[in-house]
Amino acid sequence: MKSELSVKQRNNTKIIAKVGVLSAVAAVLMLLEFPLWFAPGFYELDFSEVPVLLGTFALGPAAGVSIEFVKILINFVINGTDTGGIGELANFIVGCSFVIPAGFIYKHKKTFFTAIMGLVAGTLGLTIVGSIINYYLLLPVYSKIYGWPIQAFIDMGNAINPSIINLKTFVMYAVVPFNLLKGLAVSSITLLIYKKISPVLHR
């Protein structure tokens, strides 16, 4: 009995250590952001979800959520917040909408096909939840915090894409493509490196 408990404790310690390492890598990657040509400059692409997805596939959805949370927490400590934590909470929810569907589908049957299906589902979750949160929460919150009218964001989008004329088209032509591209890029990298990283994560 003691031996079983000891093994379980060692396994839990290993999982916690792996979550910590992956969270730290994700937090560093979160600092490396790249602007995109079709969206205003405050939408920047980063690859911090790659370590989160690697941990999710190797350790399960619960570990993925933990990595996502610790990543956001580290970034909060490093950069602080302009939104009273609302932006960080939104990022956490959006990140979870990506990794949870991917993790649950892959956990059911661990094959290359289910990994692709999980990542497709995660990308759709990311896009849908990200669009809803931007429309109803993030853009209104940033408008209040910075004292800018919503129209200012729309004008920034319109300068890039004339089809953006209101908040709905802003989400449709800036937020949706941004999240789809992010999901595709992160998913592709995850598929390319997971099998190489997997043995290390399963030790």
Image: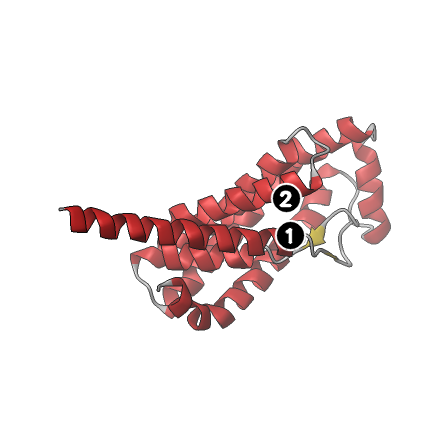
In-image side of 48 versus 81 (left or right): left
Choose between 161 and 11: the one closer to the eye.
11
Instruction: Note whether 112 is above or below 163 in the view shown.
Output: below
Q: Tell me the kind of residue under disc 1.
A: Met
> Quick one: label 1, few (<14), some, or many (20+) residues within 10 Å?
some
The C terminus - image quarter: bottom left
Whether residue 110 appears in this view of the structure is yes
In-image side of 150 versus 134 (left or right): right
The circle on residue 164 is none
Q: Secondary structure at mark 2?
A: helix
Q: Position of residue 37 (x, y in %)?
A: 78, 59
Q: Which residue is mark 1?
A: 30
Identify the image quadrant of residue 14. Answer: bottom left
Question: Residue visible at 83% across and 53% down?
Answer: 160
Q: Tell me the kind of residue under disc 2.
A: Asn
Measured in 3D between alpha carbons, the distance from the residue under mark 2 to the one under mark 1, in whole angstroms, is 8 Å
Q: Position of residue 145 (x, y in %)?
A: 77, 28
Question: Residue visible at 50% across and 70% down?
Answer: 193
Q: Secondary structure at mark 1?
A: helix
Choose between 150 and 30: the one closer to the eye.
30
Instruction: Note whether 201 is above or below 11 in the view shown.
Output: below
Q: Are marks 2 and 1 in contact (CB under 8 Å)?
A: yes
Instruction: Note whether 65 is above or below 185 in the view shown.
Output: above
Give the mark, 2 or 1, whose residue is nearer the N terminus: 1
Hey, which residue is sitting farthest left in the picture?
A: 1
Q: Which residue is mark 2?
A: 75
Question: Residue visible at 48% across and 57% down?
Answer: 53
